[in-house]
Image: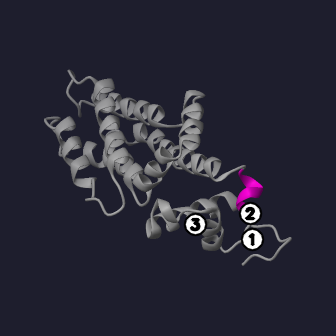
Amino acid sequence: MSPRGVTTPNPRERLFAAAERVLKREGPAGLTSRAITTEADCAKGLLHAHFASLDEFVADLVLDRFAHTARQAEQLPDRAGQSTLAANLRTVALALLAEAGPTIAGLAMARPAASMRIRQAWEADAPGFTAIQKSIADYLTAEKALRRLSAAADCDALALALTATVHHLLMTSWAGAPDPGPQVERVIATLVGGTGVPV
C-alpha cells in the first residue's frame, strides 16, 4: 500500500482501473469506496481526496471511459479505404461493450446523482454517444466518397442506427449476460452489406 504522505502516480486512473476490477469480480453491490481503495492498494482517503462522493466518482468513471472511446472514434475517418467497413466499425462499437462497460453503465443508472451528473456533462458537450455517432457518420461519408459505400447511403442514419444499437446493448446487458458482440456483428453486417467490398 502507498505510505501516507507519498504521492500516488495518476490516482484517478488507478482508482478507475481498480473500480472496474471490483465491478467485474463482485458486481455493482460490491463497489464501495473501501473496496476501490483496497483494490487500488492505496490509502483509504485517496478516493475522497479527489472526488466529493462515490456518485461523483462513478459519474467521472463513466465520462472518462466514454471520452476514451470517443477519441478512438475520432480516428475512424482516417481509416477510410483500409481494412473493411465492418472491421473498422467494430473497433468502436465493441469498445463501449468491452470488459466492465455494461456493468458500469448499469451502476450509473442505479445511482440517480451519478446519472444526473453524466447527463449534465453530456449536455455541456462532454464526449459521449453524440460525439461517437458524429465520428461514425464522418467515417461512412469518407468511405462513400471512396465508393466503398453505396452512393445512396444515408451516413447520418447509419451512424445513428449503429450508435442506438450499442446504446441499447450497453444499457440492457449485465454481468454474466450473453456476449453482445455477435449482435453488434450482425447489425454492422446488415448496415454495410452490399457495399461491394468484404464486410
Q: Secondary structure at mark 3?
A: helix
Horizontal side of residue 143 vs 183, given as left or right: right
Residue 46 got which mark?
2
Q: Quadrant of residue 33?
A: bottom right
Q: Position of residue 128 (x, y in %)?
A: 49, 37
- Residue holding disc 1: 43
| Mark 1 vs mark 3, CA separation in Å | 13 Å
Q: Secondary structure at mark 2?
A: helix
Instruction: Out of 58 and 194, give the one closest to the viewer.
Output: 58
Label at residue 66? none
The amino acid pointed to by label 3 is Ala
Q: Position of residue 157 (x, y in %)?
A: 29, 25
The residue that mark 3 highlights is 18
Q: Which residue is pictured at 45% across the width and 70% down the height?
A: 25
Q: Is 162 placed above or below 15 here?
A: above
- Residue 175 visible here: yes
Magenta highlight: main SS? helix
Q: Which amino acid does the dot numbered 2 rest on?
A: Leu
Residue 82 makes an appearance in the image:
no
Q: Is residue 97 above or below residue 20?
A: above
Find the magenta span and give its range. 46-51
User: Contact, CB < 8 Å: mark 1 with mark 3?
Assistant: no
Q: Quadrant of residue 161?
A: top left
At 26% from the left and 47% from the top, the residue drawn is 184
Label 1 is placed on what type of residue?
Ala
Separation of disc 3 and disc 2 at Cα? 13 Å
